[in-house]
Amino acid sequence: MVYLTVTGYIDHYSRSVYTFISIVFFTIGVCFMGVDLYYGASLTTYLIVISSSLAICLNIAVLGFIGWGDVEVFIITALYIGSFISLINIFIAFSLAGIVASYRLITRKVKTGDRGALCPYIAVSTSILLFISQ
């Protein structure tokens, strides 16, 4: 959650996700995954979840709907969650962003061509999913 909070804050104000922060938390996530695998987690589940998240996010990024920093955040989040909930996280984050964008369009606070930050919505959706799944 520290990673998502920091990244969401930075992305909200600068519209950029810094790669060095992602590298640090990716390394920590790989260490946690190793510990989790040592205590009996399924490597197959990790591989399926991370590769599926990567495929979905890359397809969306190639279409130009999200940036590559958002792809990094989704993949690192999938690494920490380590279950199929991380696939649902992608769709909930987009749903939350869409709801807020619709509200802001209706109230005329933004124009249709404006781009916004997705990382805060990734943080909120991950929080919601982790709270519900426990």
Image (cartoon, grey):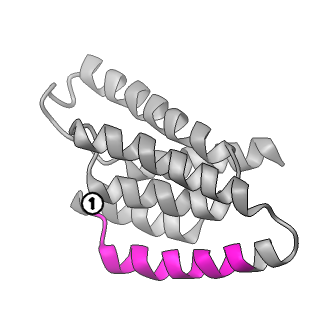
Specify whether 25 is left or right of 127: left
* Residue ID at (33%, 65%): 10
* Residue ID at (41%, 65%): 7
The image quarter containing residue 36 is bottom right
- Point out the image quarter for the N terminus: bottom right
Residue 82 visible in the current orientation = no
Q: Which residues are magenta?
A: 17-34
Q: Residue furthest top?
A: 106
In the image shown, does 11 or 85 lie closer to the viewer? 85
Q: Is residue 69 magenta?
A: no
Specify whether 67 is left or right of 36: left
Q: Is residue 108 above or below residue 94?
A: above
Residue 9 percent across, percent down from the top left? 39, 62
Residue 21 percent across, percent down from the top left? 39, 77
Q: Report the number of numbered marks.
A: 1
* Residue ID at (27%, 60%): 13
Q: Is residue 110 above or below residue 48?
A: above
> What predominant SS class does the magenta segment belong to?
helix
Residue 5 visible in the current orientation = yes
What secondary structure is found at the residue carrying circle 1?
Answer: helix
Q: Is residue 91 above or below residue 30?
A: above
* Residue ID at (61%, 47%): 86
Q: Amino acid at mark 1?
A: Tyr
| Label 1 Cα crowd, 10 Å radius (few <14 / some 14-19 / many 20+) | few
Residue 3 percent across, percent down from the top left? 51, 69
Query: Where is mark 1, residue-wise?
Result: 13
Specify whether 7 is left or right of 16: right
Specify whether 132 is left or right of 17: right
Q: Residue furthest right?
A: 40
